[in-house]
Amino acid sequence: MNKHAALDLKSSRIAGGIHTDQRHDSAHKHVTGTAVYIDDMPEPAGTLHGCLGLSTATHATIRSMDLSAVRAAPGVVDVLTAKDIPGENDISPTGRHDEPVLADGKVQFYGQPVFCVIARTREEARRACRLAKIEYDEHPFITDAAEADPKNPKLVTEPLTLKRGDAAATIARAPRRVKGQMRVGGQDHFYLEGQIALAVPGEDRDVTVYSSTQHPSEVQHMVAHVLGVPNHAVTVEIRRMGGGFGGKETQGNQFAALAAVAAKRTGKAVKIRPDRDDDMTATGKRHDFLIDYEAGYDDEGNILGAEFRYAARCGFSADLSGAVTDRALFHCDNAYYYPAVRAVSAPLYTNTVSNTAFRGFGGPQGMVGAERIIDEVAFALGKDPLEIRRRNFYGTDTRNVTPYHQTVEDNIIGRIVDELEKSSDYQRRRRQIAAFNANSDVVKRGIALTPLKFGISFTATQFNQAGALVHVYTDGSVHLNHGGTEMGQGLYVKVAQVVAEEFQIDLDQVKITATTTAKVPNTSATAASSGSDLNGMAAQNAARQIKDRLIDFASETHGVAKDQILFLPNRVRIGNQEIPFVELVKQAYNARVQLSAAGFYKTPKIHWDREKGSGHPFYYFAYGAACAEVSVDTLTGEYMVERADILHETGRSLNRAIDLGQIEGGFIQGMGWLTTEELWWDGKGRLRTHAPSTYKIPLASDRPKIFNVTLADWPEAHEPTIHRSKAVGEPPFMLAMSVLHALSDAVASVADHKVCPCLDAPATPERVLMTIERLRKTRAEH
Amino acid sequence: MTAIRSEIRFILNGEEVRLAEVAPDETLLDYLRLRRSLTGTKEGCAEGDCGACTVLVGRLTPDGLVYESVNSCIRFLGSLDGTHVVTVEHLAPVAGRLHPVQQAMVDFHGSQCGFCTPGFVMSLYALWMQDPKPSDRRIEKALQGNLCRCTGYEAIVRAARAISSYGDANDDPLAAERAEIAGRLNAMRDGARVEIGTGSKRFFIPASVDDLADLLETEPKATIVAGATDVGLWVTKFMREIAPVVFIGHLDELRRTSEKDGVLSIGAGVSYTEAFRLLAGRVPALATLIDRIGGEQVRNMGTIGGNIANGSPIGDTPPPLIALGATLTLRKGRSRRTITLEEFFIDYGKQDRRPGEFVEAVHVPLPAAGSRFAIYKVTKRRDEDITATLGAFNLMLDASGKVEKIRIAYGGMAATPKRAHAVEAAIAGKPWTRETVDAALAEYERDFRPLTDMRASADYRMLASKNLLVRFFLETSGRAAPVQVGRYEAA
Ligand code: FES
Ligand code: FES
């Protein structure tokens, strides 16, 4: 029997439309182990395996390189060095030509890829890699932002300045002032599926690359660039990633490019899947920052002016550091209005791996600077930081201009925070905690409620475009393809819901297909939380084109006015008659109506002038707030998150179940960043935390003991986004600032809340204990 | 003369496997993925820390057939002789729905990217069979060895709580077919020694402990592998040649325990999981510590003997065992000698173990009645993390409140697990007061000169270690206010 014969032709609602809870489209495959990741694909016969040879010097000229033992090792088929790159030896995503695929003559960080071994098996390739004899002439290096020349540091890209008003003069005139420096650590993505690429050579100059990437178009362009062939010779495909988080926006390029080069040289398929330690050593991470801040404020706690310098450890090349440090500046306000402000970035060159995108893209680092100032002001005035926060929120009609001169038009932070304050019982718990601390000398509790406002759009305006491809087949089933990639965030199912809704057909009639550069070209990275906003709109546009053709056709053939044609669940009403969707499709096909369409979308309203530091870079803002409570052992610095309450909004959610998962997961990932995830370099410039044994992401037992997550049901996007929903990928990450500030609050109790703890991140037990010691000393001295 | 067999035999899901071609360092994960195309089991780290590779291994024990979660990435294929290996592919649908564990994970949105998911499914499967209605504490313990970067775990824990509402663990095939599988495994036991490979590719599975002793006499350079939670990494990370290898994890004789005159003797092959069960009632502090060693999979594989024999300065069991005054039986051929555990650790990477000798058992004097014994482990992340500093304290007061006896040992503070002799001396014979403790703190610098590394700075190690003594004092001097943060204590 034909499957769609079973479709419900009576129901008032399709199965799986928008604004409904739908499972991840691959959930049943995830749990049974049948979801195919690149390493699970059957390998073409004779597939070879690559392994990168990494530098063992931090900053050096290569004096000599003897790879004879590598070549002679069992199973080795080919060894690539910089001179074997047929096209450009460069994978800089911004065209700066500062990032070689393989080091050419000099190495700029410990772990930089220098050569690539291709062997019959992965193990043979790994073993052979260890036989290289490379001699280096070492040069001085800097690995830490604090070591950079403060006056004239070496930068990897142009810095940005944002300013409004005369911040310096305002601060100088202010009744009260604060000045300080904050350090906030980086973060490894720790996607569970590491980087991987499988290149299959084709005829002529063609190659198909299966790459675990958030940005297939860029991988395509990079592979073409490195091979020296036109883009049309390269096809890049990705069905799903085992996590991305920004770590596969540009970092997959290296593996894809080398696999492709080797595949063309050997005529065999080539797979490169680095070991976890090599992955963590040789791929970029979240930028750590050194933030200098100064603010002027009044006796009430109103901030009058603020100045920031955000210096970031960018590594040896620019990668995306320009945009990341820009976004840090864009979020130096978090949800606060500064009457006068000046913020500058310093994207520092360091002899470390080139840092890259990571959920929030500099925004989180920007915000922690704002929250530090709030803390400083609150402690100086002896007030609850929440009071200071609220006092400085953006207004709706006044006090609503950002440091980049965009007016905040959709501000709802006040209501979000008010509601959370009540639902989390913040005030009463704060009093209880004070009482608890008065009777507890070793274990101290702390609580904090932090707000969040996050700008949605790529700040590079041209990236805010998307394409989709929709086919309707004659059995009424639909093939959906778009430029967005699936990394676990549920993008595929959300966009499928949009298409199902448009045609009014059940969700299982829509087939979700792997992202490939051959179907939708010139796409943007699935990043900046933009996945469903952009691709949902593009897919809707494609579906609407087909739908419009169907309406035109039905109107003509049935002699019914267009407005009398209605798509009902799995059927279409044409005047007084209802026919199954598939019937209309068949009739249209027979009448030679095109049932395929390419959709397109570009975000309206946005523009940005970087030179002037002024514009409307964000289409809208996403809002949320979190309240965290912690207990801290003041003898060891160990702690526990006792409770977290979250109120977050995603406009009119397309799929609340998916959004809730993003919020919970984002919060825990953010908590890891601010607590136990510490990147540690030794004196030789080697990253020593390059595996889960040394780099500690949160576990199930690190979750808040009580975890209440609520998706606000009242907001709706101020702008005409896809069904008035809002982005959810990145914003919840920053809700975890509440944990850092709750820790800070607990720490502050050892000095009766008289001294601002200035607790830096990550707040490891060590950093917490050392901060406690500092506070105890400061308190004793006064 | 022991019979020799030159193949390993085990059951993989439903199928009996006999393999003569096995490298000593071939991992179960590579076998599954590369040789058998069973790609449901994933590699996330290849070092036993992420759980993406989790499978179940069923083995015959004196108590019957037991299924445990293990990390297939560091489990050597050769060590699976005589076991039942169960991968995610073996979970069968029930009544038109997915297996209860899988259906719960789907319904509660327990997967996002899905890469960690098969590993979580297997860990939860093992848990469900052992404890169909687990407490949250038990769930968290079962998941200590599984990392998920996407979900934040909440959805997975919700699923874990609900599994039993999807089906009865007693109806599960692994429960229903238990007798049959046990029979098949029993039939594989032929009492033979297994020898596979030649030259640098040899490994052995001795037939008994006596056979092991004989074997080591002829192969004194062999790498002895019990749980492989350490040696596994020598292979996957350092690509070291470990052959010839002798696998000992299957030797029931090494898993025996006994108690005589207040001394508990624990066979070197007792896993952490088994030791936990044994110690929970006898030395609760040790049981609590074991809960924070590795994840469940590592605890199912790793052994007390291995933790001692490899001599790591950050092994967690030696300091408390030293504080309790434990001794060690070392065996070579037919001869045995017993030394104190302290003596065994000579220097970094150097132990008092002679060629051909192996650790047979550790003997732990139980804390005396009226004594106070505590262990404190300090780490960056609470669970599944390696020690920054670990202090173990064993105190006996006399009738007047003076310190009659104190033994203190630390891990992470020196090149070996180490007694704090100077600190002990400053306390012994004194009244057990804050003054005594404060005075003793100054002695730490005499006993220890810790290092700075990625886990902790030297300053922090020193300060936190001193504070652990303060914590011990506070905990032993009766006070109402809490002295530690905990996950499970009433708030
Ligand atoms: S792959 Fe991570 S524990 Fe085995
Ligand atoms: S679902 Fe992605 S790591 Fe768990």
Image (tube, grey):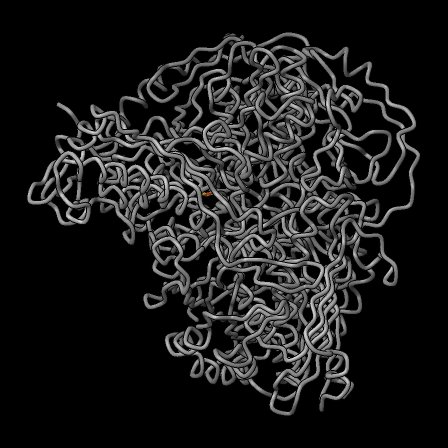
Quadrant of the image occupied by residue B421:
bottom right
**The C terminus of chain A is located in which quarter?**
bottom right
Q: Is residue A366 left or right of residue A2?
A: right
**The N terminus of chain A is located in which quarter?**
top left
User: Depth check: B188 or B265 in front?
Assistant: B188
Instruction: Residue A56: give x, y in percent of width and height.
Output: 81, 34
Residue, x 30% and y 29% (percent of image)? Answer: A594
User: Does residue A706 appear in the picture of this structure?
Assistant: no
Residue, x 64% and y 25% (percent of image)? Answer: A224
User: Depth check: B14 or A144 in front?
Assistant: A144
Instruction: Residue A338: give x, y in percent of width and height.
Output: 63, 77
User: Depth check: A524 or B296 in front?
Assistant: A524
Quadrant of the image occupied by residue A23:
top left
Residue, x 42% and y 64% (percent of image)? Answer: A648
Instruction: Residue A631: give x, y in percent of width and height.
Output: 53, 70
Instruction: Residue A428: give x, y in percent of width and height.
Output: 42, 83
User: Depth check: A700 or B115 in front?
Assistant: B115
Residue A105, above or below A679: above
Quadrant of the image occupied by residue B137:
bottom left
All told, the count of numbered labels is 0
